[in-house]
Amino acid sequence: SPSEGIPAKVNELMEAAVSDAYSSVDKSDQVRKIDQAYEKVVEVLEPEFPGEEGALKSALKKLFSQKMFSLAKEDNKRVDGRGMDEVRPIDVASGFLPRVHGSALFTRGETQAIATTTLGDKGMAQKVDTIDGLNNKRFYLQYTFPPSCVGETGRVGAPGRREVGHGNLAERALQPIIPTEADFPYTIRVESLITESHGSSSMASVCGGCLSMMDAGVPIKRVVAGVAMGALMEDKKDDIDEAIVLTDLMGIEDALGMMDFKIAGDKEGISTFQLDTKCEGLSVDFMRKALEQARVARLHIISKMEELGEGVREDLPSTVPKVREFKIEADGIGKVIGPGGKQIRAIIEDFELSNMDVGEEGVIQISGFNTTKLEEVEKFVTELLSAGGGRGGKGGGGGRRERESKPAYDGPEPVEGEIYSGKITGIHNWGVFLEIMPGLEGLCHVSELHSERVRNCEGFVQSLGVDELKVKYLGKNDKGQLQLSRKATMGGGRREGRGRDRGGERTRGPPEPPTQMSREEEEVIEKAIFGAGE
């Protein structure tokens, strides 16, 4: 255990150095003086207390914390000269990056964030693997905290735990103001790059992200801002109701204080919060005081954002692709996609689209910069489904063969449980359409393609190099659509060999006969097992 005389010696030696460090309001100068104080306490007192460097630094940290509390309690002043409920100076710049869809520079004191917003179609949604399967996020925020923002150098790699957590917090703060897909059919990606940090960069990301979406023309419902609250106590075991609540927490106050309470919301209420404490519990009265102080600060920040920002842009920037949606019957999806995706790729190329997304329910979303071409796509798809073909955007689709319309199927129904050889008529990310009988199509879902998980449906089917697949008919779903399974024909789902079946699909080769041991080998083993007991 540490020597009993350490706290008294540290207080006597370092009190003047601590006061000098707190006399500087500049972050870099203050950090330099604090670092020098830690070096001095070890250099001077370690000869007297050998091997107790950690105890010396711990005692100095407690002195810094107590001095910060006494300044606030006795002089009503914080280490940067602010009052307890005062927010640092705020500066806002919107639209300062010309090529991005939306941008904002949000500065609060010595914390600064560059936020950008990018708009895209459904294909740009973030894909998240969960225990329940693959989810698509239409709105997501990505937070980056490079070492340079705190004056350091280091390797920049994949997002760490801090970046993921802060990004999720800022994303949840902004989620309630995102317009519905019906009102605004775009995927929205916000990125917050922290260029300088001295406390609460996640709340700066909330403010900057909101401003960048406004600059991109996203019709947000309300303006959202965030602020971090802190608490100072002489000792963590003291009565929490005697603690001093701080508005707009700085980094040093977070390190030496007892609480980091991040709160974000609009003028009407809170959209998210996160609370870290070092003390032994919080009271209702203390929380009421902290929340009220945060509400006043949040309203102040929102007023500054509205005063200095440009508001929501009326028209989308010229760099944003236009989006159009229309719906077709689900049984026509295969025709729109075509064998191996040939038809949908032809449409994208001929009509100069940025992307074309065909939903499982038949909802088609197209995006591009030419509004006239977008209108032509809908007309072309309608003709394709009604007449079995149509002209492409350039010279009749580049000489591609027009597909003939197929009459309604009136043949015999397939037998449930039977295996059929199905001709591939369309491939999508969720599965493969197959014609198992003339004029009769069904869907083999991606989960039924193989006994192992298939991550890329089109790539998997192309790797087989076949035009037909052996599938088992599982029956119809609630919508009357045929459900097929290739996995059910694989007999346990072991990996395939090089052989091919009559339908042209690769199948498992004949099993190799088990290796037979000679009689001499069997005698050696028997002797080793039974001979030991003789």
Image (cartoon, helix red, strand yellow):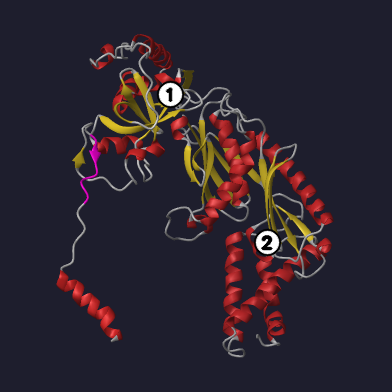
Q: Which mark is residue 477?
A: none
Residue stretch rendered in magenta on the structure: 505-511
- Judge by depth and name the residue closer to the eye, 351 or 316: 351
Per the image, label 1 sits on a secondary structure element best described as strand
Quarter containing the C terminus: bottom left
Task: Tell me where residue 28 sits by quadrant.
Answer: bottom right
Residue 33 position in % (x across, y down): 60, 69
Callout 1 environment at 10 Å: few (<14), some (14 to 19), or many (20+)? Answer: many
2 vs 1, front mark = 1
What residue appears at the point 72 percent right and 84 percent down from the top-left corner? 8
Q: Which mark is residue 367?
A: 1
Q: Is residue 508 magenta?
A: yes
What residue appears at the point 33 percent right and 13 percent down from the top-left corner? 406
Q: Look at mark 2 in the image and give the residue it sits on.
A: 253
Give me the C-alpha separation between circle 2 and circle 1.
49 Å
- Judge by depth and name the residue closer to the eye, 188 or 484: 484
Amino acid on which disc 2 is placed: Glu
Callout 2 environment at 10 Å: few (<14), some (14 to 19), or many (20+)? Answer: many
- Judge by depth and name the residue closer to the eye, 23 or 38: 38
Per the image, label 2 sits on a secondary structure element best described as helix
Q: Is residue 321 magenta?
A: no
Task: Tell me where residue 304 sits by quadrant.
Answer: top right
Residue 469 position in % (x across, y down): 29, 32
- Judge by depth and name the residue closer to the eye, 114 or 423: 423
Q: In the image, is residue 232 above or below residue 229? A: below
What residue appears at the point 65 percent right and 30 percent down from the top-left corner? 221
What residue appears at the point 60 percent right and 75 percent down from the top-left corner? 38
Helix, strand or loop for the magenta stretch, by majority: loop
Residue 468 position in % (x across, y down): 26, 30
